[in-house]
Amino acid sequence: MGRMLVSLIQMNVEAGCPEKNRSTALKLIERAAETNPDVIIMPEMWNTGYSFDSLKSICDRNGDPTLPMVKGLARETGINIIAGSVADMRDDRVYNTSYIVGRKGEVISQYSKIHLFGLMEEDRFLSPGEELGLFRLDDISCGILICYDLRFPELMRSLALKGARVVFVPAQWPFPRQEHWVTLLRARAIENQLYVVAANRVGRSGRDSFFGRSMVVDPWGEVIAQAGDKECIVNVKIDLGLVDDVRNRIPVFSDRREDLY
């Protein structure tokens, strides 16, 4: 299956400042592109942050202006970009949506967060998505989920059963739940025998602070790359042949008892 060089952008997000956030994202994507990765991934809700009081006035409209920026960058660099997720209004509803853009600037797929996090009042201001996030990058079957989705093992298993070999996770995962972040990422990788590529944010927003620790976990559950708690870019090459190797060694998919559960 070859190899994939992934570049994770871990950035600070200024709540309610989409222009500033786009400027930051632009610089970081351009920096990440210097290493010529196969794919760049960004964190969750990086355009607006959780500025819910003003969300409807500052969010994107049908992907604009964030999507044209990302499409242009993908086209110019020839790099796949998973644009984290952005607050995006469609049909008078605001969604937490990730756009997956291909090397030629085309929109390959989009995914809106299915599970909305009540503790951060997402369910009051956002509408949930209704479809799984499955797509192909360079003919590699991939999946995506967003932050709180990680706590639902059925969702990741559904992606794995439908062929995903790499699952991307943009997030705004705050203190004090940093051990949940690490444990859940490793558990989802182990039980589904795939790569998990997770980009978290850093900085503060209101009462919440964010610890970063963006990471890549391999199908054995080993953390093969991990960021600290500052804005940065993490580059790591993943060996997709390891997915088949692990699944052949421990055949959990064929050993499932579908007659019982």
Image (tube, rainbow, N blue to C red):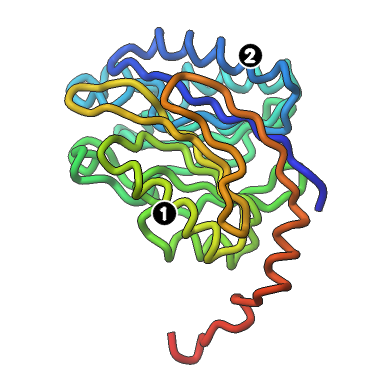
Residue 88 seen in this snapshot: no
x and y percentages locating residue 141 in the rendered image: 68, 53
Q: Check disc 1 and give the amino acid type.
A: Leu
| Label 1 Cα neighbours within 10 Å, binned few <14 / some 14-19 / many ≥20 | some
Q: Is residue 132 above or below residue 215?
A: below
On residue 144, the disc is none
* Tag 1 near tag 2, CB within 8 Å: no
Q: At 39% across and 46% down in the image, what residue appears?
A: 181
Check disc 2 and report the residue beneath it: 31
Residue in the foreground of this view, choosing between 58 and 222 = 222
Q: At 76% across and 48% down in the image, what residue appears?
A: 139
Q: How much space separates mark 1 and mark 2, taking CA atoms?
A: 29 Å
Dividing the picture into quadrants, the one containing residue 202 is top left
| Image quarter of the C terminus | bottom left
SS for callout 2: helix
Residue in the foreground of this view, choosing between 165 and 65 = 165
Residue 209 seen in this snapshot: yes
Dividing the picture into quadrants, the one containing residue 219 is bottom right
x and y percentages locating residue 153 in the rendered image: 42, 63
Q: At 61% across and 59% down in the image, what residue appears?
A: 220
Check disc 1 and report the residue beneath it: 184
Comes first in the chain, label 1 or label 2: 2
Q: Check disc 2 and give the amino acid type.
A: Arg
Residue in the foreground of this view, choosing between 59 and 120 = 120
